[in-house]
Amino acid sequence: MKSYIVGVGMTKFEKPESRDWQYWDMVKEAGGAALADAGIGYEDVQQVPVGYCFQASTAGQRAAYELGLTGVPVYNVNNNCATGSTALMMARQFVEGGVSDCVLALGFEKMQRGALGGGADGGDFKTSPVARHYGIMAARHGFEMSPPTAQIFGDAAREHMEKYGTTAAQLAAVGAKNHRHSVNNPYAQFQDAYTVDEILAAKTIHSPLTKLQCSPTSDGAAAAVVVSERFVEERGLGEKAVEIVAQAMTTDTEESFASGSCIDVVGQPMSREAARQVYEASGLGIEDVDVVELHDCFSVNELLTYEALGMCGPGESGKLVESGATTYGGRWVVNPSGGLISKGHPLGATGIAQLAELTWQLRGEAAGRQVAAARVGLAHNIGLGGAAVVTMVRRA
């Protein structure tokens, strides 16, 4: 069975504590917008997977209850930075499995200011779910006082530079591109453009990564209505429908840890395998894609993901972004929303927000950031610990 996104919504992503609201207020805004976009009511929804990382158990119910009290199942989902796309994947599976005709996927986060700790819970490393990952990092690079997530990705960047000759300017070019894209996104946390030189001159978080190459902590929510082909036909939603052509989730394998490389530990092998599965299932390849929303939690991860998705060969990603191939006028437009670096990164919302952006792009509703003639989109969302989700969508 086929599944379609027929409604999307999101809040503006904002700096934590900058707005006097609760997480259920965010979900009411984003979920209400998605339902309105689809032209349906909450009473039409049959299942509700809700993604978040930092709130207590059953916070999903507390949030969803703002949309209605219909007694439908609500599922609380936590998969680190891949939480939102995991909730969306559950929605798709409910529909494609014939369990439900209409599912609402929600994702939200209300975060604290400052850098993330060693995992979504910020706990100590001995008991952290990502202790094994950080152990690999420490064995090769040691452990410094910089924020641990910036450190593990920064060390991956150092390895890429040493192995392939990638330059600091190429890493900064990712940040410059995504900040430039966000200028035209009213939902983005930041809407300022920076040059490569300005990004290189910003405060160093963990060399070679500067502040303007790192995603911020954010508050925000996103929502997507996922429905069956029958629902689309019965409700006359063909003009709004974006088909989920294929989707795959992968987790760590031996390859993630065997090399002792941070490039592998932060998830490039997971991303590569998820992309392979999606290409095989969809019959489409990266050459068919027009627009990409990918997980640029740090600039280096965008480069690693170019390689994992097959946009270039190993070690060629720095030259790819430098060439202009991943911005307007190039082969693909990557992160027209501004990506995590500039749009923001409320963990539970990020994966769904990526699909909101792609839905608007494929419908031709992205206004000043519209990718011309976009018909096929690809989303990539990854979380340490680990999970990688790749989703292929196209205009129905």
Image: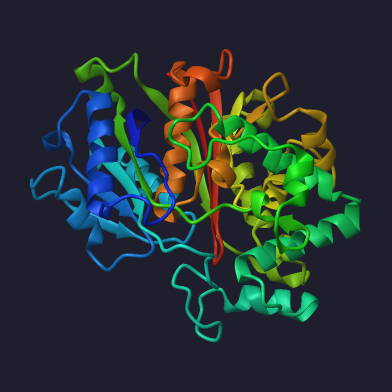
Question: 104 or 16: nearer the eye?
Answer: 16
Q: Residue furthest bottom?
A: 126
- Number of numbered discs: 0
Is 337 on the left or on the right of 363, as rendered?
Answer: right
Is 285 on the left or on the right of 97, as rendered?
Answer: right
Q: Position of residue 36 (x, y in %)?
A: 23, 27
Structure colour scheme: rainbow
Q: Residue furthest left?
A: 70
Q: Position of residue 27 (x, y in %)?
A: 26, 46
- As displayed, is residue 354 above or below residue 84? above
- As displayed, is residue 14 above or below residue 378? below
Using the rendered view, name the quadrant where residue 307 is placed: top right
Q: Quadrant of the C terminus?
A: top left
**Residue found 68% across the figure and 45% down from its top:** 302
Q: Position of residue 156 (x, y in %)?
A: 75, 61
**Residue found 40% across the figure and 46% down from its top:** 89
Q: Quadrant of the N terminus?
A: top left
Question: 328 or 307: nearer the eye?
Answer: 328
- As displayed, is residue 290 above or below residue 125? above
Is 348 on the left or on the right of 39, as rendered?
Answer: right
Q: Position of residue 339 (x, y in %)?
A: 56, 40
Report if residue 225 is visible in the image: yes
**Residue found 34% across the figure and 14% down from its top:** 239
Using the rendered view, name the quadrant where residue 45 is placed: top left
Report if residue 395 is visible in the image: no
